[in-house]
Image (tube, rainbow, N blue to C red):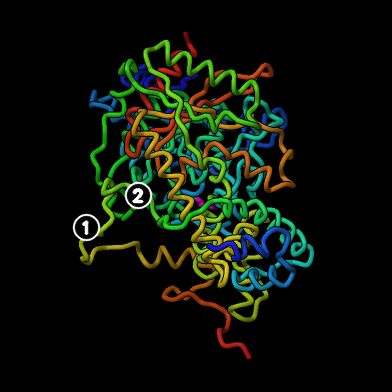
Amino acid sequence: MSETGPLAGEAAGKVTVDEVLRVAELANLELTADEVPRMQRDLNAVLGYIAQLNELDTAGVPAMAQVGEMLGGLIETDGALLRADSVRPSIDRAAVMAAAPESDGRFFKVPKVIER
Amino acid sequence: MMQTIDEVRGALAAGAVPATAIAEQHFARIAADDGAEPGSKHINSFLSLSRERALAQAAKMDDLARRGDELPLLAGVPVGIKDVLTMQGSPATAGSKILEGYRPPYDATTVARLEAAGAVLLGKLNCDEFAMGSSNENSAYGVVRNPRALDRVPGGSSGGSAAAVAAGFAVASLGTDTGGSIRQPAAFCGVVGLLPTYGRVSRYGLIAFASSLDRVGPLTHTVKDAATMLQVLAGKDELDATSSDRPVDDYVGAVAKPVEGLRVGVPAEYFGEGLDAEVRVAVERTIEQLRAAGCSIHPVSLPHTRYAVPTYYVLATAEASSNLSRFDGVRFGLRAKDANTLSAMFKKTRDEGFGAEVKRRILLGTYALSAGYYDAYYRKAQQVRALITRDFLSAFADVDVIVGPMTPTPAFKLGEKTDDPMAMYLADIYSVAASLAGICGVSVPCGETAEGLPIGVQIMGKHFDEATILRVGSAAEASQRG
């Protein structure tokens, strides 16, 4: 969160084609050749806009992940509301497997996992 | 045309019109004006109809009425469901090709609660793909037209939910709101849209977009109907650990209470540059009418308002990149053909199945969470989210509700912003702050432009204080009639 982070330094207009491809790989997305420059342009436009967050001094401000954290106990956040850990019926397996693109009725079938 | 819950329930109780006939009337209206047939308005709000289920439920309500039994709150009321919520056996597309053909084996809790309260579920409503959009132009199943102006967008992402109510296809609908997706389309289509407090309404059976922000809520013609819908929807659900067990208020009763003595905050930050002049006039007139009804008006400051949209686009996309990893061609929906390995199958399926905006957001969110950028983007945005929330908590120390424009402009033209993601994101400039803070809000029609386009006023309230925003919303609505 310092002034030397990506927001201040390499932010707006700096995402390269290589970075777009790297992030696409991380996200399991295969972009077509004409999608890459468009995504690069759009990512840079949005990241440039997001860079204005760096105007704010957030030193000492807690990172807020959930609404309940901010409400001083108005919403219970310590887990007391978790339901009892007991066995009970769930959705029928046959109904779940029937929605899969490929299944033998017991398991999901997928193409081979080990690639050589 | 029956437009309200009371009209439907009243007709049923009096034995005047059976629920089955009311359901058929709505299906007939959908058949005439929703599809692409010649002479139709081609609103394109419904993606699928659940005719059999609807008519069976209507027949059940008719039996109750015939026996003279007490009718449940939503007896016979035709309701549409946004297609990001599951209905057992009905398609659930989330507006995406990647879920084409998927029929989930269970009901969302909200769907089950509506039906248990007598509602007749007509079918599933069009939306932006995975609820990502502000115009409904990101649906893989075609744009939705605004019933009030067919060349304009209905707003998004719950565009189908707003349009179906505005067009008279349904008396009420369910939408979801992550950054404005119930309230903004409600304003664009001239209906009421309610964003309940985070945790007030169960999300079991909602296809997740951004889990710290996603909420389910109703769209209706009147504030009282929104209150009735919330009465049915609100409350703890064992199947959703984020749902709250706080007691549910009497929302229907609250709507009838006078607003005299309530303190209304008006934030200067919501009336700055970029606000359409006609929208400003209509909202300021509504505030004056609330003053005339006995409210006191107070300036309040929400100084971090301008950081809400950039904060939202970091957090929502980061959460989406994680949530949408489950769409991989293994368990449901689309699987790309001709992929010989597992990783090729994942990539091809996601490339074929996701549209451009979804890919854009997954990439942005993955980037923001990736090594070296996490602190600068994700953590920073979480901190600014805390500042935005503190703004509201401190304003609500002095006022009961905060009132401002719902959208900077009325509904824009189809195609006007599709090439410019940033321009599209700014359509949510007045809605995202409430989403980030987890507070409740409601959009209520407050007039129209010279061209006849609807304008919405938003009323924001404290966490779990839906009763007060509905009460003020009802007063704002009444002032339109007076």
Position in image of residue B428 (x %, y %): 58, 40
Give the residue displayed 71% in from the left and 67% down from the top: A31
Quarter of the view holding residue B427: top right
Rendered position, A23 above or below A84: below
* Circles 2 and 1: CB atoms closer than 8 Å: no
Q: Residue furthest top?
A: B482
Q: Is residue B39 magenta?
A: no
Looking at the rendered structure, the kind of residue marked 1 is Ala
Residue A70: image tag:
2
How many badges with numbers are in the image? Answer: 2
Looking at the rendered structure, the kind of residue marked 2 is Met
Please give the range of residues in magenta.
B91-95
Residue A80: image tag:
1
Position in image of residue B120 (x %, y %): 41, 35
Q: Nearer the viewer, residue B48 or B404?
A: B404
Disc 2 secondary structure class: helix
Quarter of the view holding residue B72: top left
- Can I make out residue B146 in this image? yes
Position in image of residue B229 (x %, y %): 37, 33
Q: Is residue B93 magenta?
A: yes
* Dot 2: chain letter: A
Q: Nearer the viewer, residue B343 or B65?
A: B343
Task: Return the disc, 2 or 1, that comes first in the chain's sequence.
Answer: 2
Q: Nearer the viewer, residue B230 or B1?
A: B230
- Can I make out residue B333 in this image? no
